[in-house]
Image (tube, rainbow, N blue to C red):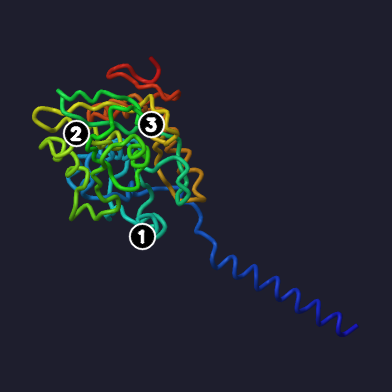
Amino acid sequence: MRAACRQSVRTAMLILGLVAASTAVAEPPERQEREALRVCADGNNLPFSNQAGEGFENRIAEMMAEDLGVPLTYVWAPQVMGFVRNTLELRVCDLIMGTPAGYEFVQNTNPYYRSVYSLVVPEDSELDVTRLSDPAFEGRRIGVVAETPPAVPLRRSGARIQGYPLMVDTRVRAPVRDAIEDVVSGHTDGAVLWGPLAGYYAARQDPPLEVIPLVDDDTGAQLDYRITMGVRHGEPHWKDWINDFIDRHQAEIDAILADYGVPLLDRRGRLIEAGQGEGS
């Protein structure tokens, strides 16, 4: 009898210890009031964001802060490995403006845009294709950022790849700008880049480069992505507020993205022509 009692006491103490330990590591409760909209962002990453507030994510964040009625503040960090861990997870900020749908390190909001990898070529180029399997790529020197989805299909099509690094400290290097400059100089015949980057940098050349969204690709590579905002796991009310904001301001968001030349796709993956809008 005494042995059974001692065992019961030990079991009870073990349970209490586990409860105490789980309480000690539990996440703090979700904040209900916000004194500021605290955004985690790369300070040198146009067209998305920079410290001068010139990116489209900056402009959308300004709309959000105004809607919340609070100041907008930033925590600047290069968007390299460890970005989420060193910003959002440390609770020094509450929002990442651009994360692909399904990105497991954050809780994704609803998407606020969908874009696609695009071919950037000179205006007078004969390379007018909308799929990576097109035989016209054979023998052409094409710029592509290493480890991005277009790289393998381009090689299979016989393109000569000019590679640029993927993970860089944007304070030091600008591989996409390098890729665009190589197209302008004629070092490459074209470049296949993520849509927002392609549209933004192509429009800023003199003369502007042509952007061809790869909407007819049949290689099986994932070239289009839905982009969400990222918040911490366990913050459903914050996520719900942002989803409501996106729903109420989608037309204004689309207009901002159009200003930056972002190729936009509708829910069915079809290209949205300038001025058309998702609901047209």
Secondary structure at numbered mark 1: helix
Q: Nearer the viewer, residue 24 or 190?
A: 190
Residue that badge 3 annotates? 114
Which numbered disc flags the more N-terminal residue, 1 or 3?
Answer: 1
Q: Quadrant of the C terminus?
A: top left
Camera-nearest label, 3 or 2: 2
Inspect the image, locate mark 3, and give the three-letter code of the amino acid beneath it.
Arg
Which numbered disc flags the more N-terminal residue, 2 or 1?
Answer: 1
Q: Taking 119 as reference, is 250 left or right? A: right
Residue that badge 1 annotates? 86
Q: Nearer the viewer, residue 208 or 159?
A: 159
Q: Which mark is residue 196?
A: none
Looking at the picture, does residue 55 appear above or below residue 262?
below
Q: Quadrant of residue 266?
A: top left
Q: Position of residue 208 (x, y in %)?
A: 13, 28
Residue that badge 2 annotates? 189
Q: Quadrant of residue 242?
A: top left
Q: Quadrant of residue 132?
A: top left
Q: Position of residue 253 (x, y in %)?
A: 32, 29
Looking at the picture, does residue 215 appear above or below residue 164?
above
- At 12% from the left and 36% from the top, the residue drawn is 186
